[in-house]
Amino acid sequence: MASMERKHEICSPFIPRRNALLKTSAEIISEARQSLRVQSTQRPFTPRDGHRQLFGKSSVRAIHDNRPPSTFSLHAQNFDAPDSRPGSGIRLSPLDHKPKFPVLCDAEDAFKAFPKPPADPLEVKKGLAGARARLLRAGSLTTLPPIERHTDERLNPGPGQKQLSAKQLHKTEHTKVHRGPHKPGPRRTASESRIIQPGVDSGVRPTNCSTGGRTELGNGDNTTSTEEDAESLMWNDTIGPLLQQLETVAAGSSEGLVDRLCDLCDGLHGTLAEADMLGRRCKRRSGILRTLFRLIDLNSAQLNLHIAKLCLALFVSGNNLLNICKLIFQISRSESNDILFQNNSIIDSLLGVLSNADVSTSGEALLYCVGTLKFLSGNSSILRLLLDKNCIGVARKLLQRLHTVEETHFTISGHILVQLTATLRNLADHPDSRPLFVSFSILSELCLVLHHHGKDQDICTNISRIYSKLSSYSECRLALAQTPDCYRLFLELLSKHHQKQDLVVRLLFTLGNLTAKSNDARQQLFQCEGCMDTLLQLYYTYQRRDALPHTPSQAGGLSPRKKHPAPSMSTQEEDDVLVKLVRVLANMCIHPAVGPALATNTACIQLLMETLELRSVQESEELLVNVAATINNLSFYQEENSAIKLSQLTIAKLMLKLVLSSSMDAMLEATRVYGNLSQSKDVRDFIMHNKVHQFVVTLLDSKNTEMCFSACGVLTNLALDPPSRVSLSLEGAAANLVDCLRDFGPGDWQLAGQVCQALWNLICRDSEKLLDTKERESLLEVLTIYLDGEEALKCIENEDMKDFHRACWELEFLPVAQKLLKTLQPSDLTA
């Protein structure tokens, strides 16, 4: 009786020891190897758009007619005439003073009187014509002549205005004053001050009289300041000639025209910067802009980028800002133009627009600006440039501004976010971007975007692509896991967009990454309201049932009213979703509280079994491997109401197709499942009856340590039954186990210990009967050598690894090897 009790104690089945009171590092590693396993899978492939456009063919906006266009034509006539003065941002109060006694306009001196229109319209027309002629002679508005015929009226002065060249401007009294030493002269009236200082940017329509004392700056000061003198001098000596030269060169057709115009634009830009006349500080900026706008009709991408850069530096706004952004966008649509952006600082200007433009007033301009960056970020060289220029930091500020956009601008905000998230998706490809995504809290900001735009499939898909890329890295996983309610948010999106496969597969992949290494993530996800309902509904939706012999309601165990209609897609797309979904389940059940709950979830187990039944290894290898790994994890929970335990014979039958396949991964996972299920006598009998044991014995020759380890587990359990020992010995199990011990023992003491356990169960004090003399002597020789610790560990040179191997040798191998050696030795030696 004591002998029988001792045998039962030693001949234990192949089950994990999860309840040890004190665990060493070796034991922890051993348990990780022997029991629950995290599943891995490939990241979903992110396709590149074949053509550069705002919204790709897969975009839901592609079917909408009101989406912003990707193609358009731009000419000089599309640009508006700039304001006459730089906007101060301050609204001036109206003047209280009103003239009480209007003075008739003196025909001899139009600057000394206020106008009083005659009663007769004919006299009005005649009087205005004469006065206008004298005014134009005294100080005319200068407008550079157009390059081409089709100039828009908006670029020209109003009706009745006469266009004079820059050369004619030098003949005016205003020019003469500044060419010599400045001498104080008599004070001019307000009318004189306004008309006598015309500029190409004034936009003032000349009249025969002036009606107020407001100057160019609108402050009532009639004197010319020192700054105005300096600007006038700079204009006459440098800027004016540069503009004239631009017009002259543009009118020609010489070779190298574009390069020369680009150089002139750069020279103009540098001159304005040195004179501190960029932005809206230059009071004649409208003249500069008119000249630049006309050059756009030359239709040169290289020149237009220089023009755009200078226009943005002059702080164009409104329609002009929109058209400049459209112009840059149009250039960026061609990949051949990427080199132009690398050799031009226009990217800095674009980032400046993103930092400062207001969504409510310049939303469409922002859209095309970000669309340009989306295209450019697809170029690896420019991608590095964008990171160096703090594009991610600028993107974060724009994201924060878009969070607070009013409802009236929600649509354009969504369009901008599509482009911005696509740009961030491209930036996430670069390894140097990951610390920036974390430090700028981009992952959390994107979660907030999902909260606000959860109905927008384009935005959600782009963000899911970012998450699927970055969640493969530990620092990004941690940042995302620390975002409040991210798990609940993902589940809501999975339920809301269940038919959008590319979105679903990436969110599931992200959840699989989050639950791969974190027990907290597994528990938080499982505890979210409706978690399992959402996941199982998705499972049911993407499960193919073409060859299913029974009804869907019986197979899925789900209520018919909750089932989603199956989306139309390829087999590969369906499998890709299920691979990621099953991986989430496999990772979740590693948690000691989640695992038992999943093991008792009948609907979940039935869906897994259904997949094994429906799919073949040839077409769905990765999916079946993941399903087998999930069942293997769940089979470690031996609760009485475990659905795995209740269906273990059915599962054992379904595993046959994996064991007999040509896939090593499928064979390995199926063998692991048999290692757990063979704790049951019914499963062991099934294995022996269907001759699965023969295949398991041959796996010992695979030269794969993991395969040998799993096969040893199955043989350990099968050898518990006396009838099975003889059958195993006839198949050469003992000889193969001895060879496995000799080949792998010194490098894997966990495997060596499992081999000894299988041999111990197989021999069970009948070594003379079940081992021939040669096998017995060979085993004794190997055990004698391996039981000498110094001899066994001498091949390990790395000191850190030597400590680990020694721990495994002492805990996993030594106890069972000593017992096995004692059984093999003759009785007279053991007395």
Image: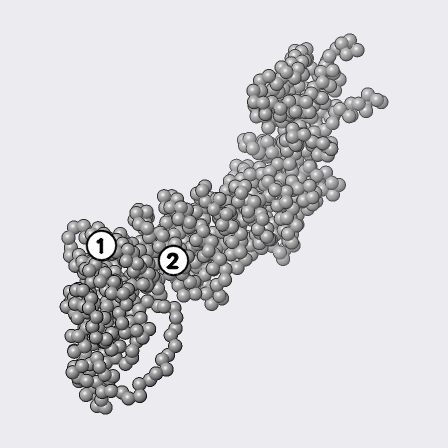
Residue picked out by circle 1? 264
Q: Kindly identify which numbered label has been placed on residue 353.
A: 2
The colour style of the image is one colour
Q: Nearer the viewer, residue 158 or 458?
A: 158
Question: Crowdedness of circle 2 by 10 Å Cα count: few (<14), some, many (20+)?
Answer: many
Distance from disc 2 to disc 1, alpha carbons, whole Å, reads 24 Å
Sequence-first disc among 2 and 1: 1
In screen coordinates, is 434 left or right of 312? right
The kind of residue tagged 2 is Val
Residue furthest out toward the front? 184
Question: Crowdedness of circle 1 by 10 Å Cα count: few (<14), some, many (20+)?
Answer: some
Q: Kindly identify which numbered label has been placed on residue 705.
A: none
The kind of residue tagged 1 is Leu
Q: Nearer the viewer, residue 198 or 226?
A: 226
**Residue at 79 percent of width and 11 percent of height:** 831
Residue 247, percent across and down? 19, 60
Q: Disc 2 on helix, strand or loop?
A: helix
Residue 46, percent across and down? 45, 46
